[in-house]
Image (cartoon, rainbow, N blue to C red):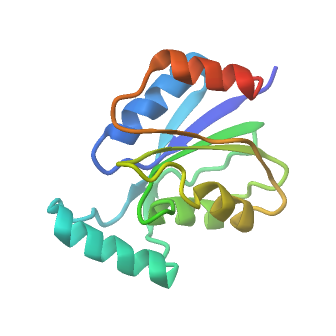
């Protein structure tokens, strides 16, 4: 039987709720990425901070979430869509955890930008992994839509 891990970073708990639903439906384990330094709570300050980090390719230090994934076959990877890309803690995970030979399934929450370049960015960071078709949703997600997506990707 294939082993599933749901890894996520969530700024405002929206992505966390989606990750928990995916973990429940797949019976997978769940792991939250927690950066050493939290982002500013003020939206305008946080967006300036994040834009700068994304443009620089910055990888924040993670205090939780970078443990080995050796025993897992499938890694669901969740993030908010920030400026059409994944959050910097996701980049830290991708660069610090050996994902070679793993199947990665991206998912994101957004305010209107869909998956943006998240799937493409993951494929670029993980050329020795298989990346399946991702899932995107706004803050209010439909459990049935998740179920149908999981069926579509055969999980």
In the rendered image, the residue lying farthest to the left is 42
The answer, for residue 124, to whether it is visible in the render is yes
Residue 72 locus on image (x, y percent): 73, 37
Vertical comparison of 9 with 155: above or below: below
Q: Residue at x 73, y 60 (%)?
A: 123
From the viewer's side, name the closer residue of 153 and 63.
153
Q: Residue at x 73, y 24 (%)?
A: 152
In the rendered image, the residue lying farthest to the bottom is 56
The answer, for residue 72, to whether it is visible in the render is no
Horizontal arrangement in the rendering, residue 98 relative to residue 31 (left or right): right
Residue 69 locus on image (x, y percent): 69, 45
Q: Residue at x 64, y 64 (%)?
A: 121
Q: Quadrant of the C terminus?
A: top right
Q: To which quarter of the image does residue 2 belong?
A: top right
From the viewer's side, name the closer residue of 43 and 90.
43
Horizontal arrangement in the rendering, residue 34 relative to residue 3 (left or right): left
Horizontal arrangement in the rendering, residue 131 relative to residue 113 (left or right): right
Residue 102 locus on image (x, y percent): 79, 46
């Amino acid at each position: 039987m294939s082993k599933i891990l749901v890894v996520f970073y969530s700024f405002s708990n929206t992505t966390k709720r989606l990750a928990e639903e995916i973990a429940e439906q797949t019976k997978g384990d769940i792991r939250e990425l927690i950066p050493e330094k939290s982002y500013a709570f003020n939206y305008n300050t946080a967006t300036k901070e994040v834009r700068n980090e994304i443009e620089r390719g910055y990888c924040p230090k993670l205090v939780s979430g970078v443990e080995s994934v050796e025993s897992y076959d499938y890694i669901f990877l969740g993030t908010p869509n920030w400026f059409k890309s994944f959050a910097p803690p996701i980049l830290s995970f991708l660069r610090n955890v050996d994902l070679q030979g793993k199947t990665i399934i991206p998912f994101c929450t957004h305010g209107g930008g869909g998956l943006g370049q998240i799937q493409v960015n993951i494929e670029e960071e993980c050329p020795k992994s298989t990346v399946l078709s991702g899932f995107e949703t706004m803050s209010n997600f439909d459990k049935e839509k998740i179920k149908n997506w999981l069926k579509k990707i055969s999980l």
